[in-house]
Amino acid sequence: MIAFLSHVEDLAGEPSRFLHLGLTSSDVLDAALAVQLQEAGQEILAGVDELLSACKKQAEAHRGTHLIGRSHGIHAEPVTAGLVFAGFFAEVVRARRAIEDALAEVAVGKIAGAVGAYANLDPAIESRALAALGLRPETVPTQVVARDRHAAFFASLARLGTAVERIAVTVRHWQRTEVREAFEAFGKGQKGSSAMPHKKNPILSENLCRLARRLRGYADTAYENVALWHKRDISHSSVERVIGPDATGLADFMVRRAATLVGGLIVDTVRMTENLNLTGGLYFSEAVLLALVGTGMTRQPAYELVQKHALAAFAERAGPSFRDRLAGDPEVTARLPVDQIDRAFDLQHHLRHVDSIIDRALKTEGS
């Protein structure tokens, strides 16, 4: 800033005495940074909207596509692929709101002099100048705008990156050879491995997972910038010159790549059904448990009874199915006739609320 002012003074001569009158460097630089962050934030939000659109389309397209829900990577109970995409949508909506809130918080400047006390300026000048930039004055300025505002902005980008990462982790699992439920688009002439021609690797998803780590690192660095000495030291400025363009550019790249990933995803509905049926209906175990409890049986004995047949069915694939084992156990049928066991094996009963959940998620857009 000093070099710039000296150069202008050399060019302008005597009128330059009015330049930078009563200001300190950060009066100019912090206002400029706030404007840059607003413009960068709007670009990022445009990419977020592309990702939301892609998630919404997939949620609608696969409302009724049956999919096994997993916890700890293990088959749990059935859901639909549309419900998964609706979950992505809802999380990205929350990330969008966080960015909007952070942009509002960082839309702040200060033209308050060397230590923020307006010693040689009228606060009215500050209000008028900042308003022309779409900014408002810092509540209690020092020599700089308080850096907790900037930390909140970079943290919101990290949150967006984490939402993108969750999508990417799911796609990476879906694309595993043993799973094969969905795949990244694979272009003509594309190669997955320099050595193995058969390979189709989830490179977009893996790339996004690694970049999310970088965004979180920038957020951590921004928090380190908050506690400056007294009215200000210079330890934050060199860092911001790096993380400002890097974090905003990276977030924009990530969200647009994620939109391409989700929009071009190839969903194998047949394979999803095959995987759903892989355990022979073990995912109905909770429904059977609750049916037994509904007859008056206490929970722990009911749990042990159902678990015994579920584990045996899983271990002895060539033997009777889970449902047949239950139907052949007098201890079970004494409480649950076969027709009631069959009702517990009703897939549509499990999924009867899916549409309302998806509707609830998709209605959050823009609210």
Image (cartoon, grey):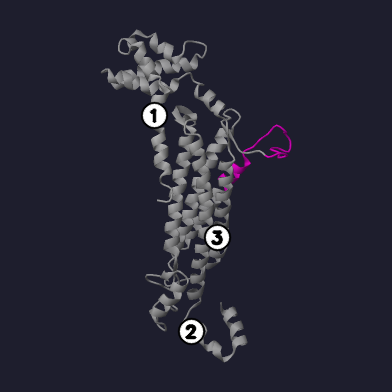
Q: Nearer the viewer, residue 213 or 244?
A: 244
Specify start and end residues of the magenta stretch as a single range.
187-210
Horizontal and vertical percent position of residue 213: 54, 49
Q: Quadrant of the N terminus?
A: bottom right
Q: Looking at the image, do the residues carrying marks 3 and 1 touch, with CB atoms under 8 Å apart?
A: no
Q: Earlier in the sequence, mark 1 or mark 2?
A: 2
**What secondary structure is found at the residue carrying circle 2?**
loop
- Tell me if residue 276 is in the magenta stretch: no
State the residue lying farthest toward the left.
Answer: 296
Q: Amino acid at mark 3?
A: Ile
> Mark 1 against mark 2, which lies toward the viewer?
1
Decide: few, some or many residues near mark 1? Use Cα within 10 Å; few <14, some 14-19, many ≥20.
few
Residue 21's label in the rendered image is: 2
Q: Which residue is mark 1?
A: 352
Numbered marks: total: 3
Q: Measure how far apart labels 3 and 1 are at the Cα level.
A: 47 Å
Q: Earlier in the sequence, mark 3 or mark 1?
A: 3
Q: Amino acid at mark 1?
A: Arg
Decide: few, some or many residues near mark 2? Use Cα within 10 Å; few <14, some 14-19, many ≥20.
few
The residue sitting at 50% across, 21% down in the picture is: 277
Residue 59's label in the rendered image is: none
Is the stretch drawn in magenta largely helix, strand or loop? loop
**What secondary structure is found at the residue carrying circle 1?**
loop
Q: Measure how far apart labels 3 and 2 are at the Cα level.
A: 30 Å
Horizontal and vertical percent position of residue 261: 58, 43
Q: To which quarter of the image does residue 288 belong? A: top left
Q: Measure how far apart labels 1 and 2 are at the Cα level.
A: 69 Å
Q: Nearer the viewer, residue 90 or 363?
A: 363
Judge from the rendering whether residue 195 lies leftward or rightward of residue 27; answer left or right: right
The residue sitting at 49% across, 20% down in the picture is: 279
> Mark 3 against mark 1, which lies toward the viewer?
1
Q: Which residue is mark 3?
A: 243
